[in-house]
Each structure stands twice: as structure tokens, then as C-alpha cells.
């Protein structure tokens, strides 16, 4: 996915005939996974992907290249360590705590501009990506079949995540592993719900945000109820404090410190991301009279999400977010 204005850590790509861009996609897709597990090497597999394309393989894929962090995480969590993945340095910064990568995984360039040469050199059985530009797909299909997953759906991000997982699982012969992964994730929802209920604090809304600095301006990006983080909060019975406009695909809002004045007297739990250690919320905004006057700032009701947990990821990242919700609401 492309996340506007968020800094990215990228490894330079040796670009060949064309640069390939991993782009965000939204909408709906057909269910692609079968009901029964398919063992690797047992025969043909196929799914209908997000773009409505039939992706067929003679046998489940063993050598997979992933061009987005969420799909890198999902493949590894199913027991399919990618042979190549885009922007490994960024993955380790933002995602790696939930599903670490092996040293054997080859970096294939940035998520925006993966290297055709690097991908081709790995001779993958399958390439997994998120895209809304069909013109680019034929360039990659010269080397391997391409599975396009949805990546986000503001209407129901948890159902969307399951569809994405099931498609990857079907084409890699890991449907049993996908079922176990989803059962694990559902267990996290149940455990987090129980922990919040036991703490008796679930009536306090939360606000999750990240942000960035451009010159002297600080932008704050709240995650609304339709975001993946917001969907997780809703699943465990929490109220999301952000009710403003969103981008319509990822469930992301946008504001500045002046826009945060709406929460001056609101009791809430503010959860934020600081994986790049730029500490916008504990350093750069300190001294701003609007920020300093917010009730959650004065109360110290601010909670930094542990590093390397991806807020746009798969079930393992989502499970880690749920664990942190339980910790925040028990405090």
C-alpha cells in the first residue's frame, strides 16, 4: 500500500525495463480459498483474485515474492517464508516484531519501485501484490503468476483480511495453516474482549493516530472505525473517538493540532505509533498550548504502540495490536 506522507525506509532497486509500483486497492473480491487443506505439491490450485482474475498454478507455490509488507507477513505466518520481499529494512522497522524475516529473504527493492531484475532472478512460483493499476501486472507476469489482494476495505476490514489470507493460503497449499492462524486471531479477540470487560474500562473511547512533520507543520492522522485498527477496536467493544472524514479506503482521517481541540475535554485513551522514534506526540507537540490543554495529555493517558507492529498488516500484527489494547485498558 502507499501511505501518504509517511516516511519509508527503502533499499535502492536495480531497475530494469520498467519500474513496478505496489499501489493501494479497495473494493470487494470473491472468496478464493477452498474449504479443505491442500498439501504442497498435490496438484493444481486456483483462486479469483481482487481484480477478478483467475490465478492458476500447476501446484501450490513454494517460492513466493511479496511486494507489500502485509502480504510478506501473511505468507510467513502461513509457513511460506518469501524468497524475496520489497523493502526489508522498512519491514523490520514497521512489521518485524510480529513475523520476523529469515536472513535468506532477498530484498527486491522498494514497495513503490520493485526491481524487475531482482524478481526475475529469484524465479518465483508466485508474486503477491496490492495494485490498482492493471497495466503494470503484465510486466511481472512474464516471470511468474501474480496474485492481487485487496489490502484494505473500510466497510469490513476483518472480513477483507480473511479473504486476503485465504487467497494466499490456497495458492501456497496452506489452507490448514490459514484456518489455524484465523482461529488464533479469533482467540485474541475473545481474550482481549474479556480483559477489557474484567478491567471495567471499556466505556472510555480510544483515539489511535500517527503523524509526520513537514517543515514547521505537524500533520496528525487519526485511524477511524473503518481502518484495520478501528475494526479491531470495534471487534472488542471499544468506541473510536475519531468521527471525522476518512479517505474512503483505508479508514484514515487527517487533521492538525488545531483539529485536536475537539478533544480538549474528552476522556479517552490516546494510542500512537513512534516506530521511527521521531516522537511527535511526546516532544514536538509539547509546548503547543492546544496540545498541552488536551485532557488526555494532562491526564497522561497516552500509550505508545510497541515498535514494529504494522497497523495495516495480517492476523499476527492484528493480534499484537489486540494484545496492546488489552494492556492499555488494563492500565
Image (cartoon, rainbow, N blue to C red):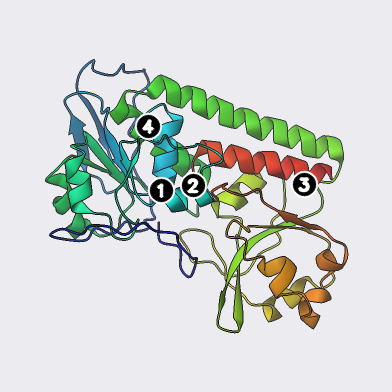
Q: Where's the N terminus, which quadrant?
A: bottom left
The first of marks 3 and 2 along the sequence is 2
CA distance for labels 2 and 4: 14 Å
**Res 53 → quadrant:** top left
The foreground one among 96 and 259 is 96
Q: Give the label, 2 or 4, closer to the camera.
A: 2
Using residue 62 as the reference point, say whether residue 212 is left or right of it: right
> Between marks 4 and 1, how big is the CA–CA gap?
13 Å
Question: Crowding at label 4, few (<14), some or many (≥20) Cα neighbours within 10 Å?
Answer: many
Q: CA distance from mark 3 to mark 2?
A: 24 Å
Residue contact at pointers 3 and 1, CB within 8 angstroms: no
Label 1: how many residues lie within 10 Å, few (<14), some (14-19) or many (20+)? many
Label 3 with label 2: CB-CB less than 8 Å? no
Instruction: Work out whether residue 236 can be spotted.
Output: no
Q: Circle 4 sits in a helix, a strand or a loop, which is it?
A: loop
Of circles 4 and 1, which is in front? 1
Q: Is residue 205 visible?
A: yes
Q: Which residue is mark 4?
A: 81
Numbered disc 3: secondary structure: helix
Which mark lies nearer to you, 3 or 1? 1
Q: Earlier in the sequence, mark 3 or mark 1?
A: 1
Q: Which residue is mark 3?
A: 328
The residue that mark 1 highlights is: 88
The image position of residue 167, as x and y in percent, is 34, 35
Estimate the x, y position of residue 238 in percent, counting from the top left.
72, 48
Pinpoint residue 69: horizontal percent, then vertical percent: 42, 47
Amino acid at each position: 500500500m502507499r501511505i501518504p506522507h509517511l516516511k519509508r525506509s527503502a533499499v535502492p532497486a536495480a531497475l530494469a525495463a520498467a519500474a513496478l509500483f505496489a499501489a493501494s486497492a479497495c473494493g470487494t473480491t470473491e472468496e478464493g480459498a477452498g474449504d479443505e487443506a491442500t498439501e504442497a505439491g498435490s496438484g493444481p490450485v486456483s483462486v479469483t483474485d481482487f481484480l477478478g482474475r483467475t490465478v492458476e498454478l500447476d501446484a501450490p507455490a513454494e517460492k513466493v515474492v511479496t511486494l507489500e509488507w502485509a502480504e510478506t507477513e501473511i505468507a510467513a505466518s502461513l509457513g511460506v517464508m518469501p524468497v524475496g520481499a520489497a523493502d526489508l529494512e522498512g519491514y523490520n522497522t514497521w512489521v518485524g516484531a510480529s513475523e520476523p524475516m529469515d536472513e535468506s529473504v532477498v530484498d527486491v527493492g522498494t514497495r513503490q519501485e520493485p526491481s524487475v531484475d531482482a524478481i526475475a532472478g529469484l524465479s518465483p512460483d508466485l508474486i503477491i501484490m496490492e495494485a490498482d493499476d492493471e497495466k503494470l501486472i503484465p510486466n511481472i507476469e512474464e516471470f511468474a503468476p501474480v496474485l492481487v489482494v485487496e489490502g484494505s476495505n473500510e466497510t469490513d476490514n476483518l472480513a477483507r483480511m480473511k479473504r486476503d489470507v485465504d487467497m494466499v493460503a490456497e495458492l501456497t497449499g496452506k489452507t490448514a495453516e490459514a484456518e489455524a492462524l484465523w482461529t488464533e486471531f479469533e482467540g485474541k479477540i475473545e481474550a482481549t474482549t474479556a480483559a477489557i470487560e474484567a478491567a471495567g474500562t471499556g466505556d472510555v473511547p480510544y483515539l489511535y493516530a500517527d503523524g509526520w512533520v513537514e517543515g514547521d507543520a505537524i500533520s496528525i492522522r487519526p485511524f477511524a472505525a473503518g481502518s484495520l485498527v478501528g475494526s479491531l477496536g470495534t471487534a472488542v467493544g471499544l468506541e473510536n473517538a475519531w468521527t471525522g472524514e476518512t479517505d474512503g479506503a483505508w479508514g484514515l482521517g487527517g487533521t492538525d493540532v488545531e483539529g485536536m481541540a475537539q478533544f480538549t475535554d474528552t476522556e479517552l485513551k490516546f494510542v500512537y505509533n513512534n516506530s521511527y522514534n521521531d516522537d511527535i506526540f511526546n516532544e514536538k507537540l509539547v509546548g503547543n498550548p492546544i496540545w498541552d490543554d488536551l485532557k488526555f495529555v494532562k491526564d497522561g493517558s497516552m500509550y505508545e504502540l510497541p515498535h514494529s507492529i504494522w497497523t495495516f498488516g495480517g492476523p499476527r500484527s492484528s493480534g499484537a495490536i489486540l494484545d496492546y489494547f488489552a494492556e492499555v485498558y488494563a492500565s
